[in-house]
Image (cartoon, rainbow, N blue to C red):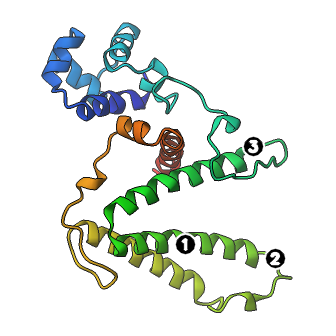
Amino acid sequence: MTSQFNRIITLLRKEQGITQKQAAADLGVSQALLSHYEKGIRECGLDFVIRVADYYDVSCDYLLGRSTDRNGLTLRVEDIPNPDGVKDSIYKGSTLPTMNKKLISNSLNILFDKLAVSQNVGLINEVSAYLSISVYKMFRLLYSSNSKNTSSFFSVSNGRWAGYSSAAMNTAEANVEAILAGEEVAQGPAMKDTSCFAMTSQTLEQDYRLYANSLMMLVKNSEKRIEKMK
């Protein structure tokens, strides 16, 4: 069984507000056994996977983490919605650049829509600053890798830009955390109520039919990379 199974069955149960006791009874197992499955202590058989898939109305591939789509669809780059007109490009036979651009672009649409609902200007500005500086850093690394490009393109010197930009990103991230935690910062008022950010995997798919799968895939790919750092 994949390491994703226990996380996903726990997520589905909690998102739907079902107690572990009720889910165990509905699935025909003891609560203790279901608890072991959810914690990854024990592995279940294929018959239980099928029962869980029917119970939560999702595919087995979704339960096993093989697909980010609840119906088990495997997205190809051409299947990913492209409402922002991201140009398809192929590099040495790979469509990966286009796929990543689409995933990021579509995910940003969800992020900024959620930010707009918050109506917190400070929060929007700090998130925007963090993202803008991250793009600036990557662009500057590419630009600076070619010695023929003049450094006067940038106003911040070579000796300071890397450390200062990282510090600016960390500051923006800290301000976002503070605002969401109910603290006032110079950039904007605190958020007293974050109920506008309540969401589940199902509501994301319902509210963002074009973009949700891109966000799910971005999360999955990012966490794979993070897990490799252990």
Looking at marks 3 and 1 on the same chain, the residue that comes earlier in the sequence is marked by 3
Corner quadrant of residue 23: top left
What's the residue at 38%, 27% (across, down)?
Answer: 5
Q: Nearer the viewer, mark 2 or mark 3?
A: 3
Looking at marks 1 and 2 on the same chain, the residue that comes earlier in the sequence is marked by 1
Amino acid at the residue labelled 1: Ser
Residue 9 horizontal/vertical position (percent)? 32, 27
Q: Nearer the viewer, residue 156 or 112?
A: 112
Answer yes or no: do the residues labelled 2 and 3 have beta carbons within 8 Å? Answer: no
Residue identified by numbered label 2: 146
Residue identified by numbered label 3: 95
Q: Nearer the viewer, residue 87 or 59?
A: 87
Q: Nearer the viewer, residue 152 or 116?
A: 116
Q: Quadrant of the N terminus?
A: top left
Say above or below: 114 vs 19. below
Q: Label 2's element?
A: loop
Amino acid at the residue labelled 3: Thr
What's the residue at 26%, 77% (across, down)?
Answer: 189
Q: Left or right: 93 with respect to 37?
A: right
Q: Label 1's element?
A: helix
Q: CA distance from mark 1 to mark 2?
A: 22 Å
Q: Label 3's element?
A: loop
One can see residue 174 in this view: no
Q: CA distance from mark 3 to mark 1?
A: 25 Å
Residue identified by numbered label 1: 132
Amino acid at the residue labelled 2: Asn
Looking at marks 2 and 3 on the same chain, the residue that comes earlier in the sequence is marked by 3
Q: CA distance from mark 2 to mark 3?
A: 25 Å
Q: Nearer the viewer, residue 199 or 228?
A: 199
